[in-house]
Image (cartoon, rainbow, N blue to C red):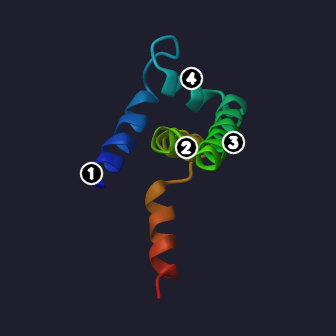
Amino acid sequence: MFENLEQLMQTIRERKNSSPDKSYTNKLLNDKSLSVAKVKEEIAELIEAVEQNSNKIHEAADVIYHLMVYLEAHNIKIEDVMSELKKRQK
C-alpha cells in the first residue's frame, strides 16, 4: 500500500526536470506561493468534505499530493518526516 506513496514521491522528484507547461507538479514545485495556496485550499476542501460526509477520500488524496509537493519544493524530505514520526512512536 505505501509503495504508492513512494512512487508518488519518485514522480514528484522526476517532475522537477520537466517543463512547467507540461507538468502541473513542476509548476507547483517552482511557484512556492501557488504551492502553499493549493495546500491551504485542499485542506479547507478536506475539512468541508469531512463535515459534509462526502468526497472525503478524494479530498484527502489531494491534500497528501499537494503536501508532498510543498515539502519537496521547500527541500523537506519526506524521508526525514517519516524518521521524525518513527522517533515519536512509543
Quickly name the residue at label 4.
27
Quadrant location, the N terminus: bottom left
Sooner in the amino-acid sequence: mark 1 or mark 4: 1
CB atoms at circles 2 and 4 under 8 Å apart? Answer: no
Image coordinates of residue 39 in percent, x first then y, are 64, 40
The residue at 51%/63% (across/down) is 81
Marks 4 and 3 sit apart, C-alpha to C-alpha, by 21 Å
Which residue occupies the extreme top position in the image?
21
Marks 2 and 3 sit apart, C-alpha to C-alpha, by 9 Å
Residue 63 — which label? 2
Marks 1 and 4 sit apart, C-alpha to C-alpha, by 25 Å
Left or right: residue 15 compared with residue 37: left
Q: Amino acid at mark 3?
A: Ala
Image coordinates of residue 9 in percent, x first then y, are 39, 44
Sooner in the amino-acid sequence: mark 1 or mark 2: 1
Image coordinates of residue 62 in percent, x first then y, are 51, 38
Quarter of image, res 36? top right
CB atoms at circles 1 and 2 under 8 Å apart? Answer: no
Left or right: residue 26 compared with residue 14: right
Image depth: mark 4 or mark 3 in front: 3
CB atoms at circles 1 and 3 under 8 Å apart? Answer: no
Image depth: mark 2 or mark 4 in front: 2
Q: Amino acid at mark 4?
A: Lys
Residue 15 drawn above or below residue 86: above
The residue at 56%/23% (across/down) is 27
Residue 3 — which label? 1
Sooner in the amino-acid sequence: mark 1 or mark 3: 1
Residue 44 — which label? 3
The residue at 47%/88% (across/down) is 90
Sooner in the amino-acid sequence: mark 2 or mark 4: 4
